[in-house]
Amino acid sequence: MKILYVITSTDVGGAEKALLQLAAKTAQAHTVRVVCLKPLGPVAQELAQHHIQVISLNMRWLGGRIIQKLAAQIKDFQPDIVHAMLYRAIEYARVACAGKKVKLITTPHFDLSKKSFPLRWADRLLKDLDTLTVAESFSTARYLIEKQKYNKNKVYLLPNGVDKTVFYADESLRKQMRQKYGYTPEHTVFMDVARLAPVKDPFTLLKAFCKVVKNHPNARLVYVGEGEKRPILEEFIRQNGLEKTVLLAGKQDNINAWLNMADAFVLPSVEESLPLSLLESIQVGLLCLVSKVGDMPLWVEHGKNGFAFPAQDVTLLSCFMAEVTDNAPLREQMRKCSVQISQRIGQSSQQYQQIYQQVLNNSFHVKTN
């Protein structure tokens, strides 16, 4: 079987990471090529390490020529299935595949409800060109069916998954990482693993932490990720004398090691679907503090394995962080609950292999109530 993956970018992000895991798994048994609309990013290098061909269409902005280039890639590769991810890649793939004898699977990996009306209208206009839409979160599936009027018989819910051989609790790794970065058992380490981008709202977390650390000097904050908000964070850290309590670690490769170092995961995003970093944190056994967006409240049971708060609510987030910092028994109780909840996390890459085969054989059917 030949699978052509189409994605908007190969920068560091949840969708790109999901593509990497999926393409690497698929390439073990099938012929795979990845087409990226934008210039190649770091994930393209990781794909190449798996001997997967990655081609950039070097898109700088909107343009019909990109669709022509994508159509040319489809003609050259002759895939059995095209699998598109992220908004622009999905819409362009729909047009490029129109009229061709190729199966088209789409997976959004974003919150379509936050897109502008013209973009939502375009999606609604082109949606029926999909052979199958695989929604990575319940909130995405519901929005597509109820608001975008997708055919429910062509929308399949397959939540993001985690490779459990890569993400797991490791006490020796925890001790090693904490010693390396100067954290003692008395420190409570909060960690945000995400792009430093407006949609992830890292500044809300920093402002909340600034409130907490005044009365809880053993609290620590670590950001793992890069992005355009870094200069603003750096300036706030400098102005408030937080240099010794906040670490901007930048992009890191061994995320499992960093998560093991932490006591709590925090993600204050203003929009999400179902972020991989949250599932990875739960898999490692961290308590989680998350904003009430997307599917995150479905995985963070308020008061059990963490707390959920309204997006951009600095005060409430700071209160939850203070409570977690003060209460070691609560942290342990929530950690155990995360371990239990982690049993719900699947390995979606393996399930996709079955979907591909069934879609190719016209034997895949979405079960609806």
Image: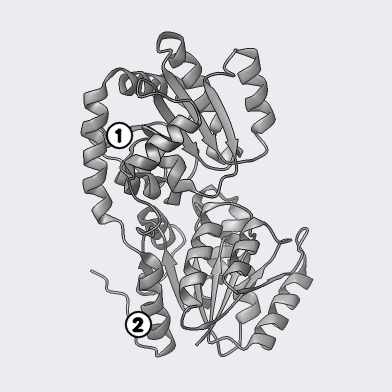
Relative image position of residue 320 (x, y in whole percent): 34, 23
Examine the image and state in which quarter residue 52 appears. Answer: bottom right
In the rendered view, would you say 167 is above or below 307?
A: below
Residue displayed at 44% across by 44% down: 257
- Please give left or right for residue 35 compared with residue 313 in the image: right
- Element at badge 2? loop
Residue type at mark 2: give it: Phe
Q: Which mark is residue 364?
A: 2
Q: Are marks 1 and 2 in contact (CB under 8 Å)?
A: no
Residue type at mark 1: give it: Gly
In the rendered view, would you say 268 is above or below 184?
A: below
Q: Which residue is mark 1?
A: 306
> 180 and 78: which one is in front?
180
First in residue order: circle 1 vs circle 2: 1
Q: Residues within 10 Å of mark 1 (few under 14, many from 20)?
A: many
- Please give left or right for residue 326 compared with residue 266 in the image: left
Relative image position of residue 291 (x, y in whole percent): 41, 35
> 291 and 282: which one is in front?
282
In the rendered view, would you say 331 is above or below 136?
A: above
Relative image position of residue 355 (x, y in whole percent): 38, 78
Examine the image and state in which quarter residue 34 appears. Answer: bottom right
Is residue 268 among what the camera can see? Answer: no
For the residues marked 1 and 2, what is the alpha-carbon distance in whole angstroms?
37 Å
Q: Which mark is residue 11?
A: none
In the rendered view, would you say 174 is above or below 237?
A: below
Residue displayed at 68% across by 38% down: 228
